[in-house]
Image (cartoon, helix red, strand yellow):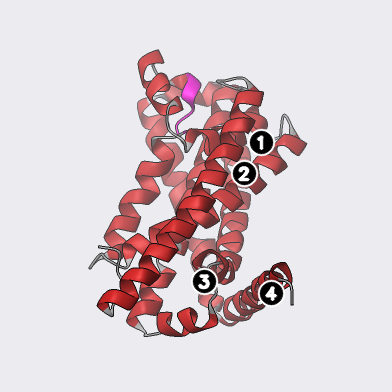
Amino acid sequence: MPEKWVSAGKIAAELARGLTIYSRQRTWLLADLIQWPFWIIFFFLAILMYAPSFLGDTEVMKSISYSFFVFIFVSSFMWNATSLPLEAQMGVVEQLVLTKTPISIHLVSRTVATAADIGLGGLALLLLSSLFFGADVSLAKPLHFTVYLAIAFIFFLFFSSIVSTLLLSVKSPWIVTNILQFVVPFSSGAIPVHLLPPEAAAVVSASPFFYILHPIVASATGLFYLPETQLFVGAVAATAAAALLSVFAEKYLMRRALKTGRFAVL
């Protein structure tokens, strides 16, 4: 059977597994419905406490709304990365090796919950920011927004697989995940770049994550910090690099596991 059909079958199997797990874990849905409205209101109130003038600026409120959407997006994928260390503690990783399923494909099952998390969190964000803070949440470029969101999904699927392999070597992976879920978005576009001082904006725009996250916000608001062609090329290049690094990290993990008898890259 051609390799591509085998991979497609594994992806379909992981999607089915993810849907089954998510449908049985109703507490996940309840947690999403409780936590995201709380965090969204807290986030907006914290900003408005220090910059109340933002409330009267619809463009700024729109930028802040979609910037926080980026935070929800990254946060959900970072917690996706903790599934592999958890499975390692349960002794499931050995079975994964026997099936010869790439880690990035294996994480597709967890991505079902991630997508639901992003969808519920994003919907709550847009509703609350529109109803309570008067933000205009209409998309400036809907098609571009969809394309960049799809690219970001693919990128963070590979990136979360890289993080997963690294977390296998950490005693407290949840601490690292907590740090990453804030550092990655807020250093790469979760703060509207046009609100930053020029020096800070230059630093943020140098991050490879910027080419993944900023286009999402920019296509929603219509405010592009860099030429869109440059952002698109950068996003595709960053995704390709993440795919290559995930393959390298997985192969290194497997070689080290066969050599040392344990799953860790360090």
Q: Is residue 247 above or below residue 18?
A: above
Q: Earlier in the sequence, mark 2 or mark 1?
A: 2
Query: Which residue does the image show at 47% across and 63% down from the upper left?
Result: 80
Q: In whole angstroms, how far apart are the C-alphas of marks 3 and 4?
A: 31 Å
Region rendered in magenta: 189-194
Q: How many other residues sit within 10 Å of disc 1, few (<14), some (14-19) or many (≥20)?
A: many
The label shown at residue 6 is 4
Q: What amino acid does circle 1 point to?
A: Val
Q: Nearer the viewer, mark 1 or mark 4?
A: 4
Name the residue nearer the viewer: 57 or 8.
Answer: 8
Question: In the rendered image, which quarter is residue 43 located in?
Answer: top left
Say what secondary structure mark 3 lies in.
Answer: helix
Say what secondary structure mark 4 lies in.
Answer: helix
Is residue 46 visible to us here?
A: yes
Q: Earlier in the sequence, mark 1 or mark 4?
A: 4
Say what secondary structure mark 2 lies in.
Answer: helix
